[in-house]
Amino acid sequence: MTTDAPSNDNNLNSLIQSKRERYVDTLRKLLSKSAEGEEALQDEIAAYFMRLGCQVEAISSAPNRFALALDFAPPADVPEADRVSVVAVQPGAGDGRSLFVFAHPDGEPVTDTDAWQHDPFAGTVENGRMYGWAIADDLSGVVAMICAQDAIRSAGLALSGQVTYASTVSKRRAQGIYAVLEKGYHADAALYLHPAESGAGLGDIKSRASGILRFRITIRGQLPDTSEPTHTPFSHLSINPIDKAWVVYQAITALDEQRAQRIHHPAYDEIGRSTNLHITHIEAGDANRPGRVSPTAIMTGSLAFPPNEALADVQRELEATLRQVSEGDPWLKQHPAQLDWLQGIGGVEIAEESPIYQTVAAAIHDVTGIRPKVQSLHAASEIRTPILFSGIPTLGLGPLSGGNTQSGGTDEWVSVDDFINMVEVLAKVIVDWCA
């Protein structure tokens, strides 16, 4: 670097403020482009980075594949076509620390927007909010990378360390981040530009994510020995799987309470528990045929666990509980409940004392005046992928936002002011980290 850090900060911030409307318009233009589909949007993102002097590569990869050894999920019902992630590299001029910055440009497929009050692709701004489809989750993160690179380049700042930007497809289990890391891209630290689901904007840094296990339990019953269409007169001759599901359900809720007392991570004290296990769906029988005994009862559920627990250990605990309850019931002993794991994702955390956390927290405070805190309550965040796959310490941050479509909201939005703040924060982190 040829000038001192305070001068760089002042010049950079002033430059970003002078380009505020241009950067807001860039967000609007790419939002409008996303209406043409993911491929057209990624092509446009690549073109932006090429105009900014970056070395750009498109990486095609198949969705629904897991590169992390412990992650798992069932295969997709229908094979999906390959999807493309875009990587843009700004080489460093020396041997300074490198940074990997990523976000995902794709939202869920556009479905029913009748409830929206704003055109989902017009980028309407009202009361300081820009509205748009997937603008918070997560197009604003991709655009912030473009704007930060533009600001640093316009300011004429020569970085010693390399910056790698990645627009990685994510939704519908695309897992573009895996494909990019598998290509060998690496850095000393990484940032995932995605707003915290807490709604606190840049006031929260995502440095921790719970693990998640999702499962299905199938309990078999026995139909009465009759050809009668109505089983009610013979129900005493049957084994109703709902009765046995209740036995299993009680064992699971007991395990949940035991774990709540035994498993502790101080980061979760604010909500009173470090782990939760619940059944969220029970299916048995036919509501239109109440006289028939069901042959099976099926329960599905989910278990969240803190990052200081290993995924495999948690799996073994639920498996042991089901074995124990089956051994204690005459019917289940001969016909054990069947456990199928639907998805498994491990947890991660980065210490607040780490250099990248300190750099990001300082940048947020300098730009916004806010001293950010750790957001610990999100599960299965993509900050975990660079950490677990490549050992890259990774944090998540993003602007104030709301109405996220994936969380059941409408009129998804980002704060225009906080979007510009995020551009400033990112540019400052890049300059400070890669000096």
Image: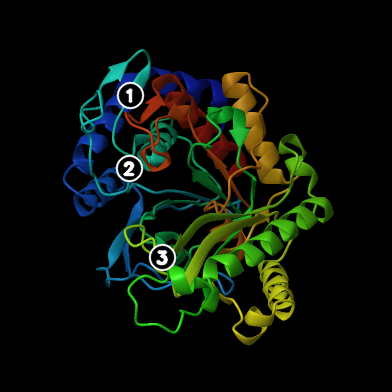
Question: Residue 421: where, in percent of width, then height?
Answer: 49, 25
Q: Is residue 364 visible?
A: yes
Q: Is residue 1 visible?
A: no
Closer to us: mark 3 or mark 2? 3
Secondary structure of the residue carrying tag 1 is strand
Residue displayed at 58% across by 45% down: 378
Q: Amino acid at mark 2?
A: Leu
User: Spatial distance from mark 3 to mark 2, Cα to Cα?
Assistant: 61 Å
Mark 3 — residue? Answer: 285
Disc 3: CA contacts within 10 A as few (<14), some (14-19) or many (>=20): some
Where 165 falls versus 412 (above or below)? below
The circle on residue 52 is 2
Mark 1 — residue? Answer: 130
User: Spatial distance from mark 3 to mark 1, Cα to Cα?
Assistant: 47 Å
Residue displayed at 68% across by 77% down: 326
User: Spatial distance from mark 1 to mark 2, Cα to Cα?
Assistant: 25 Å
Q: Amino acid at mark 1?
A: Met
Q: Amino acid at mark 3?
A: Gly
Closer to us: mark 3 or mark 1? 3
| Count of numbered marks | 3
Marked residue nearer the N-terminal end (3 or 2): 2
